[in-house]
Amino acid sequence: MSFVRASFTARTALQNARRYSTAPPTTTKSSNLPYWLIGGGVVGIAGYLYLDRSPTASASLKPKISDQSPLDPQNFKDFKLKKVEPYNHNTAKYIFELPPDSASLLPIASCVVVKSADDAPNPLLDPKGKPVIRPYTPISPSDLPGELTFLIKRYDQGKMSKYIHDLKIGESLAIKGPIPKFEYKINQFDQVGMIAGGSGITPMYQILDYALKDPSNKTRFTLIFANATEKDILLKEEFDALKKKYPQTFNVVYTIDKPETSDWKGPVGYINKELIAQHIPPADLGEKTKIFVCGPPGQVNALAGKKEGMKQGALSGVLKELGYNEDQVFKF
């Protein structure tokens, strides 16, 4: 930065802060002008250094994030795979590149749909030759600049999950969205219960990461998260960190099918009526509570009834037996 710019920056800051110098001392035979000039120079340089290194100044130097999302809810757009971060034995984080001055700006809660890029060397097609399209919920914050991150578990029968796991850095994936799912508002409910299984955890994480970090949040969240084994628990470190940081507004209960060591102290087996009644806010709270459900179709069906395509479908299963009504339950 040039001296002229530095002087201007310091001078402007001083003016904005309404800092004024006092009147100069009475002139004597021995002038103090040189000392005043030197002192003024030191103050100016110090002011410049403070402004240049202060958090406020640093923030002002960051590139402005566009208020327009690079995603398109009507059309697929190609985004390059920037980085892959292995997570566990069958899951990884796939980070796609957005323009550096933009963020996804996905509303909470929403997802996107993906397909192979039009110029992909081996496009993913169904038996009729049509593109395979699948929904995914990003786990990166909606205001994160330059990146869009998915946590994707590879399933043996999952065409899209296997396709994405085979992508190479620099290759593209076509993404369209956002696809709004549930318009979540801070403090809309007194208590929120979340029931998730496997990779169905991503919309729950999207809501929790958004709500718990809001300083005005007073809603208490309780998550029951079911997995086959302890090593299959996705985002466990993140949930444990949220529980530690927000003990008054968040609790998580993990249940697994097959404990692999005697160290496991949590529940074992499928999510059942007793586990829900013990941890999830009760139905008699009425409109003050909401229950979110997301997981494998069999689990969702047993707990809350089948979805009808994009529609919720009738409420049935365990949650209906426990007295919840359709307005209290949302199936992702």
Image (tube, rainbow, N blue to C red):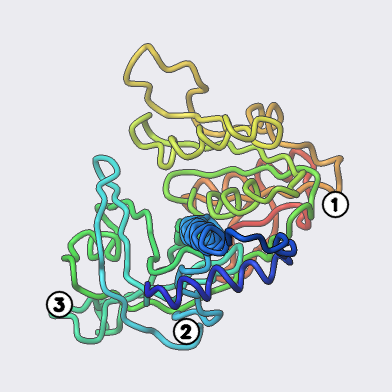
Task: Give the residue drawn at x 48%, y 16%.
Answer: 265
Residue type for callout 3 = Asn
Can residue 210 be seen in the rendering of this structure?
yes
Furthest residue to the front?
29
Of helix, strand and loop, which one carries label 1? helix
How crowded pointer 3 is (Cα within 10 Å; few <14, some 14-19, many 20+) is rated as few
Location of residue 134 with respect to 4 vertically, above or below = above
How crowded pointer 2 is (Cα within 10 Å; few <14, some 14-19, many 20+) is rated as some
Please name whichever residue, 88 or 105, is drawn nearer the observer in this view of the structure. Answer: 105
Task: Give the residue drawn at x 78%, y 52%.
Answer: 187
Residue 122 badge: 3
CA–CA distance in space, label 1 to label 2: 34 Å
* Quarter location, residue 190: top right
> 261 left or right of 171?
right
Furthest residue to the top?
262
Of helix, strand and loop, which one carries label 2? loop
Instruction: Work out whether mark 1 precedes mark 3 in sequence or the reverse, and give the earlier one.
Output: 3
Instruction: Work out whether mark 1 precedes mark 2 in sequence or the reverse, and give the earlier one.
Output: 2
User: Which residue position is annotated with label 2?
Assistant: 72
Task: Give the residue drawn at x 64%, y 46%.
Answer: 212
Location of residue 331 with respect to 10 vertically, above or below = above
Residue type for callout 1 = Glu
Of helix, strand and loop, which one carries label 3? loop
Please name whichever residue, 315 or 62, is drawn nearer the observer in this view of the structure. Answer: 62
Badge 3 vs badge 2, beta-carbon distance below 8 Å = no
Indicate the position of residue 275 as horizontal and vertical percent values. Answer: 63, 28
Indicate the position of residue 130 as horizontal and vertical percent values. Answer: 30, 84
Q: Nearer the viewer, mark 3 or mark 2?
A: 2
CA–CA distance in space, label 3 to label 2: 24 Å
Residue 287 badge: 1
Residue type for callout 2 = Asp
CA–CA distance in space, label 1 to label 3: 49 Å
